[in-house]
Image: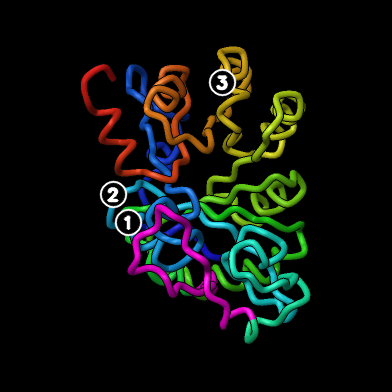
Amino acid sequence: MVKIKAFLLPLMLLTGINLLPGQESPFLFVAHRGASYLAPENTLASINLAWELGADAAECDVMLTADNRVILFHDSNTKKLTGEDLLIRETPWEQLRELIIRPRETNRPEYSSERIPLLEEVLAIVPVDRMLVIEIKTGPEILPHLEEVVDEHWKSGRICFIAFDFETIRTAKTLYPDMPCYYLSAFRGDAKRHVKPAAEHGLDGLDLRAAIINRKMVARCREAGLDLWCWTVNQPDKASRMKQLGVTAVTTDRPKWLREQMSGPGF
């Protein structure tokens, strides 16, 4: 297993817990699927652009191909993003690597030929002072292959794991106890039910849809010793409210723009 590198920043820089008395929690800007407002999501271009724009972290989604390669992709089917109707889990990497990710309207024209990357390609470009947030889109079956890729190709920077499947993120924390691991949830009831199990299994926090976060949710997480992140927010007023509530990281499609807006008058 990879051991936490000596050059990695302390965990307190990643989360809002374990701070000294009176010390303000950091507020991190996490680029959603990379800088996906300007470059096609989950591509090397969007991840690299996130670093260039000063994002504290870049988030990506990982899935497993038919031949057990770990790739960056969000959907189980490629049709929406590429026009080709293929199931990721039933398609080998050699076929998937040829697909072009369709840019969306806000993407820059120079990113019109981006392809699906391997996770190992992304791990090779994580800056020493930044974090890669890896969302595991499958169940635990990906973990042996994910572990192999991380152990072989992670050279610099920091890694955080997030997942909607509790067993998957619990197992990821067992494999990598020194890495931050967060349980994802879109529903308040589900989030409430998982606060206690998350704490019991040593998870670092919850990463929740912003709309379900309120003061009671923040208090519930704090009482359990859990950090709290939110997704996906592109409005400065909403991001500012999350920060005021005590959320320590916001996932956004526009990390640079949102940070600049929140640094302006009225925030």
- The reply to whether callout 1 and callout 2 are in contact (CB within 8 Å) is yes
Residue 172 picture location, percent across and down: 66, 54
* Label 1 environment density (alpha carbons within 10 Å; few <14, some 14–19, many ≥20): many
Identity of the residue drawn at 43% across and 68% down: 44
Q: How far, Cα to Cα, is label 2 from label 3?
A: 28 Å
- The reply to whether callout 2 and callout 3 are in contact (CB within 8 Å) is no
Determine the image quadrant of residue 241. Answer: top left
Residue 97 picture location, percent across and down: 57, 81
Identity of the residue drawn at 77% across and 48% down: 167
Identity of the residue drawn at 24% across and 28% down: 263
Q: Label 1 belongs to which residue? A: 51
* Label 3 environment density (alpha carbons within 10 Å; few <14, some 14–19, many ≥20): some
75 shown above or below 78:
above
209 inside magenta stretch: no
Q: Which residues are magenta?
A: 96-120
Label at residue 54: 2
Residue 179 picture location, percent across and down: 53, 50
On screen, residue 116 versus residue 27, left or right, reads right
29 shown above or below 110:
above
On screen, residue 95 versus residue 110, left or right, reads right
Label at residue 222: 3
The chief SS type of the magenta part is: loop
Nearer to us: label 3 or label 1: 1
Kind of residue at disc 3: Arg
Residue nearer the viewer, 119 or 187? 187
